[in-house]
Image: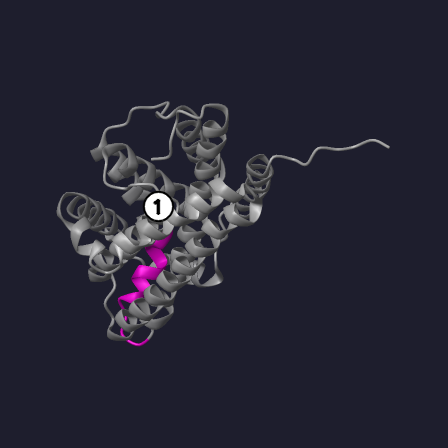
Amino acid sequence: MKLFSPKDPVQAELEKMEKQEEKFLAKNRERKELPLNRFLQDKIPDRLQGTLEAAFARAFSLIFEKGTGIIEKTYRKEELEKESSIRQYAADVRGDRKSLKSFSRQAAGSGAGNTLASAAAGVGMGLLGIGIPDIPLLTGMMLRSIYETALHYGFSYDTEEEKRFILLLIQGAMTHGERLERVNDELNFFMEHGSFSQEEGMEELIRRTAGILSDELLYMKFLQGIPIAGVVGGAGDAVYMNRISEYARLKYHRRFCLERLKKEYNPSSHLN
């Protein structure tokens, strides 16, 4: 009788994550134009996209420079760090896939909560016809969702490298086609090698991320600026927040598993 050794739990989890990542890439390979967007196309002011891009760029710069502490007051940072340490200890002791999956379950719970919060805020702003002034709030919610996901997996988010990682996460979640493939490859390169293959200045990276967001959210933010009718545009915040949360979980879970795999082959290494 031939005996088969069980597959390494971390390796098995990595293979599952690669498949889920491929599904995400396939689902977002082509940009889907809504009929509503085609209807609004001729009604969008010429300068709106540039205004949105500038608003997102200002929001990222301000939050990275002064606003992270304010965002941290909206969740239990120390408690999340302790819970992550406990789960990591359990994963070390048990060494099974169930303990690894507990990280993604916790992160998914936070992501769902942030999606609901963004929906409520977006709809409320849309009811009042507030579109562009909603950008700082939406940006803060995006970053809060990613910060919480990072903490669930035991990663920081306040260093220069982590900010680059986060901006690329947002780019990957909000773009399509070849650009999505390039961003995804760059994130995977960083996770495997600990550095980025392309050294892009922070200001340029913020500008590029803001440009992608303004392009993707153009129609929804225009509609959100119309009282009452803006409810539809505001509800779009939840759709995009869900996409960002999903992609962040995929990448952080893969990064977490890669770190554990490195730890198995090199016991002297450790998680962030």
Residue 222 magenta-highlighted: yes
Residue 131, position in %: x, y? 25, 63
| Quadrant assignment for the C terminus | top left
The residue stretch that appears in magenta: 215-228
Residue located farthest toward the front when viewing the structure as drawn: 93
Q: Where is mark 1, residue-wise?
A: 150
Quarter assignment of residue 220: bottom left
Residue 114, position in %: x, y? 35, 61
Viewed as shown, does residue 214 lie left or right of 179?
left
Q: Is residue 218 above or below residue 206?
A: below
Question: Taking the image as drawn, is residue 163 in sight?
Answer: yes
| Quadrant assignment for the N terminus | top right
Residue drawn at x 44%, y 39% is 256
Nearer to us in this view, 146 or 96: 96
Q: Amino acid at mark 1?
A: Ala
Element assignment for label 1: helix
Residue drawn at x 57%, y 44% is 96
**Disc 1 residue crowd, few under 14, some 14–19, many 20+, Cα 10 Å:** many
Residue 183 magenta-highlighted: no
Nearer to us in this view, 105 or 250: 105
Q: How many marks?
A: 1
Quarter assignment of residue 132: bottom left
Magenta region, mostly helix, strand or loop? helix
Residue 27, position in %: x, y? 55, 48
User: Which colouring convention does the figure follow?
Assistant: one colour
Q: Is residue 97 above or below residue 79?
A: above
Question: Taking the image as drawn, is residue 176 in sight?
Answer: no
Residue 179, position in %: x, y? 44, 35
